[in-house]
Image (cartoon, rainbow, N blue to C red):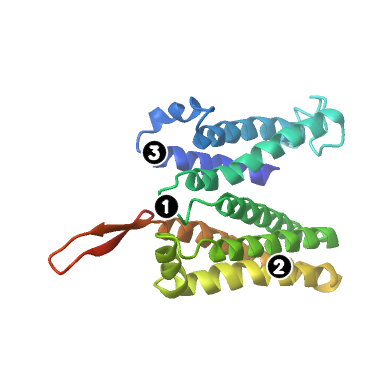
Amino acid sequence: DVVSFLAIAVGGAILVADLGRPLQAWRAFVNVRTSWISWGAWSDLIFLVVAGLLVLPALSLGGSEPFSGLGWDPHGGDGGGLALEIIAGVAAVVVMTYAGAVLARPRAIPYWNSPAVPLQFLLSSAAMSVAVVMLIEVIAGEPVSSGQMVLLGLLAAGLTVTVVGHLLARTDAPGKKESLDRLLRGRYRSMFVWGVFAGGTVAPAILAFVGAGASGARGALALICCVLLVPGGFWLRLLTLRVGIFPPVHIPGVGGPRSVATPAGG
């Protein structure tokens, strides 16, 4: 809980700083009816508040726990703690999904305009979260359970299927074809094929399922999965942005008409 709280807090601070005008950040909250960015901003804030309240009874200051009498179990063992966990969990799901939903909404960029994009972001974030939790358990000397490895394997396998489905859909659509050329045959081929797909998605899925049945190697496999998944998830998002391309524009020229594809993601 504390790690996820800090991660979302730092991520939110980075997003605000990246706006260029941090004092205008409040505008992100005012368009909930039509804007995924507003949904993400509110969900980020709700998670920070609710997760902060959830872990407060377990906060130790100077060897004492001054908030231990607040009346709910920080591990979700009672009604109050469970309710806070559910609210924080729903908010976290929106935070994991909304960036992909923002990309998927406009129709002008075919590679982004797909439900597979937010689904990839969600599955990747969930898989990375499970992997980081297992890494913390390994560092703390706690056992990693078979169920955790199965969950990680299912998330990574689901991500694999989603990525493949996205690559195979609408391959001849103007703009999508140019994006796939960049991703599979151009400058980003090695990073995507080996860093994102093979190393950051397929390999963790296989290792997680192996670890579910190999209790002696579970800690080492959990560590490897985390090391593969986290950079793979980062590169997945980066390359999704980089290969976003507007459909080619037909431009008449001196040497005859030609088409130009305009990059949207850099």
Q: How many marks?
A: 3
Quarter of the rendering containing residue 88 = top right
Q: What residue type is labelled 3?
A: Leu
Q: Residue 93 at x, y = what percent?
A: 65, 42
Q: In this view, does 153 lie above or below 72?
A: below
Residue 159's tag is none
Secondary structure, mark 2, is helix
- Between disc 3 and disc 1, whose residue precedes? 3
- Please give the residue where the numbered disc 1 appears in the rendered image: 109
- Closest to the observer, 48 or 168: 168
Q: Which residue is drawn at 42% across and 52% down?
A: 109
- Please give the residue where the numbered disc 3 appears in the rendered image: 19
Q: Which residue is drawn at 60% across and 46% down?
A: 96
Q: Calculate the distance from the C-alpha at mark 3 to the C-alpha at mark 1.
A: 23 Å
Q: Residue 37 at x, y = what percent?
A: 50, 36
Q: Which amino acid does label 1 sit on?
A: Ile
What is the quadrant of the C terminus in the image? bottom left
In this view of the protein, can residue 3 be seen by the observer? Answer: yes
